[in-house]
Image (cartoon, coloured by chain):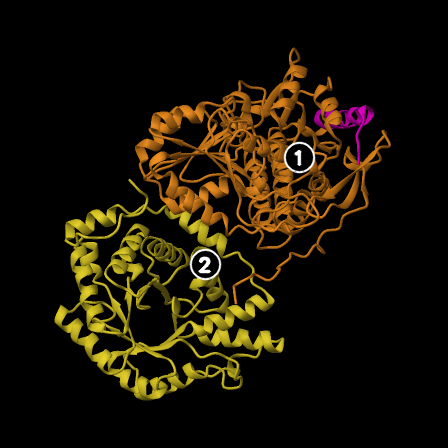
Chain colours: A yellow, B orange
Amino acid sequence: MSLLPTRPLTDTSSDGLKAYLKGLPGVDQVGLEARAATLATRSIKNESKIWAIDTAISMVDLTTLEGMDTPGKVKAMCAKALRPDPTDNTCPSVAAVCVYGDLVPTARDAVQNQIHVAAVATAFPSGRASMDVKLMDTKEAVAAGADEIDMVIDRGAFLAGDYAKVFNEIVAIKQACGTAHLKVILETGELKTYDNVRRASWLAMEAGADFIKTSTGKVSPAATLPVTLLMLEAVRDFADKTGTKVGVKAAGGIKTSKDAIKYLVLVNETVGNGWLTPDLFRFGASTLLNDLLQQRQRMRDGHYSGPDYVTID
Amino acid sequence: MTFDYAPAPESRAIVDIDSNYGLFIGGKFVEPKSGEYFKTINPATEEVLSEVAEAGQADVDAAVAAARKAYEKTWSKMSGKDRAKYIFRIARIIQERSRELAVLETLDNGKPIRESRDVDIPLVAAHFFYHAGWADKLEFAGYGPDPKSLGVAAQVIPWNFPLLMLAWKIAPALACGNTVVLKPAETTPLTALAFADICQQADLPPGVVNIITGAGDTGRMLVEHPDVNKVAFTGSTEVGKAIQRAVAGTNKKLTLELGGKAANILFDDAPIDQAIEGIVNGIYFNQGHVCCAGSRLLLQESIAEEALHSLKRRLQTLRLGDPMDKNTDIGAINSQAQLAKIEELTKSGEDEGADRWSPACPIPEKGFWFPPTVFTNVTQAHRIAREEIFGPVLSVLTFRTPEEAVEKANNTPFGLSAGIWTDKGSRILWMASQVRSGIVWANTFNRFDPASPFGGYKESGFGREGGITGLGAYLDAEDKS
């Protein structure tokens, strides 16, 4: 008996995966939420805050995932992603732009090779399509120049206990990605329990995820502090067991600098400073960036500027 | 660059500490007849905060007389509904002045501001609110149709949760219609004196609450005073025994809340991350100055190595330092004397062959500090497994079966609290019925609520504080505990 699963995972049949995932330690909801709430009381001031804001900006996947997206909208967002604050050269670029697959060529053309282009794939956001469609969705995005793929897991299969289906899909998509990085969206708002989140995290990591991501942003609740803390514990334990570092992306619902800094504190005190890099932690967000920019200007100038002093793209 | 948190100190401008304080007797601050004063310091800096009066026999007599007069003339004659108004008023003022009280508590005690702000003071207010609600409903509490108050309560409290222990003592006493003479610990008198100010602000009738400061002798004079009807003490088992001897043969009703050596029992199916958090909270909260601290960790042997790995990793993120910094997890040890006791006992742990470990942890130059410490390879025979250390020191032992866990948990003269960590509900219930301690926490630790009775078995004392049960200690009725 041990606390964490014994590696390596050899039996990837549904029964094998079920036994493996049920061997994971349980999660106490009250304790997890209390820990997240305590860490949220950390008070980040002065030079730490300046550092945290720049770090958070550099971790943003600037996202537009709307039915009304157009090439014009994506181009404007890409310009913003490259130079979030056109009045200040010291402001870092964001990590990536995140768009639907059909807009990857537009985004790639706009950002060239300066930052990453991430595409959502696999019948985002519901994941309700045949495997062939999901694979084609992924391959097209990669061929069009996406260097990161944000896939969704089949929550229906997961909740029905068909872990092998979820596992095999991730393995197949990972293969279709080639050299592109794979982020696996768990959609924790639909998994509902923390035990499910821990199991889905390990399932995705075992299947080859480079990142595990909380949410599509289309389901409420999206990212929360407790769920992100739990996923950070999962990547920490996975790295302990395997030596492989998997990233975490908190997506949806993070709107203010204050919130973003709370997430950085979670990372710092759960997996440590080594994870505070865009290679291992990301924010999936659209409105967060402007609040980070306003706070950045305030730290620089000593006073608030206002929403008209940051660009709206 | 690393994510180091810049200093985020809470401002102390909100508190206004006088250079000296008299005794609060009969609704007024008065000079001590003894003429003696002693200093109270900030244990994190050794700065003298103020001088407070040392009450002698004549002062104790005056305080008890004031309480007696207020009891006979005012408080015992007042309806429960009217008593409730005063107690509710006190509770609201505590909330309004919560930041001031938190800062004052941290300065005088050394505990982190995060704890005084988020734990101590909110609980203090909650205790007054809860007991205010009882004041006009005592006939429904199960102590008969018309339960009577006792008279004058002599209350002596410790330094680990100064204002919270005051609330545990004063709130039920007042709700049940008693008047009070309370002596705070000599190292932490300031929040009790601030409470005296709150009593004035609330227009509490003079003499209902009297606060006298002093050391052990003052406390002895108070509990031995012939005109008190009730003695309530929280503190060391040694002093508790002396009080019990002094009270023997009198009509004084007595409750004692004494030491502890709680076992935190971790099974292999525990929710491990939350269990580690609970173990850390159980022993390092308030620098381990907690009578119900989980100072013995009982690990199921099959997972001991993994659990220790997780525990040590977690301890490396604890932040020790300036208690006024909002990011501090571990503050200062309350006094030089307590630090010496912790050092003596931890040395015995090493001498007796246990393995000592602490995370790398810079210690401030001034003040009294002790790093979070873990002892492994501890057996039941070691002093660090048997004696209360009252500091941030955890002794780790192992067990093989649930029965053995129960035996080891119970194999102590104390019996205040215990923690059980397992995902198995049936095991929680079985363990809770077997462990001889007044409080059993399951998958949590150090949780307090005014509605939940608190108290011990064996040398951890008797009587309960809090909840319906706790009211019995302040009513002329059979004790329900």
In the image, is residue B64 part of the stretch drawn in magenta? Answer: yes
Residue A114 position within the rendered picture, expressed as x and y whole percent measured from the top left? 38, 83
Residue B186 position within the rendered picture, expressed as x and y whole percent measured from the top left? 72, 34
Question: SS of the residue at dot 1?
Answer: helix
The secondary structure making up most of the magenta span is helix
Residue at mark 2: A272
Start-end of magenta stretch: B53-72
Q: Distance between the residues labelled 1 and 2?
A: 34 Å
What residue is drawn where x is 56% and y is 22%? B147
In the rendered view, tell whether residue B151 sits above or below residue A168.
above
Q: Residue B256 carries which label?
A: none
Exactly how many numbered labels are in the figure?
Answer: 2
Query: Horizontal placement of B380 versus B200: left or right?
Result: left
Query: Could you tell me if the residues under marks 1 and 2 are in contact, i.e. CB atoms within 8 Å?
Result: no
Residue at mark 1: B340
Could you tell me which quadrant the N terminus of chain A lies in?
top left
Does residue B461 appear in the picture of this structure?
no
Name of the residue lying farthest toward the top: B249
Residue B136 position within the rendered picture, expressed as x and y whole percent measured from the top left? 56, 32
Query: Horizontal placement of B38 versus A54: left or right?
Result: right
Between B99 and A237, the residue placed more toward the observer is A237
Label 2 chain ID? A
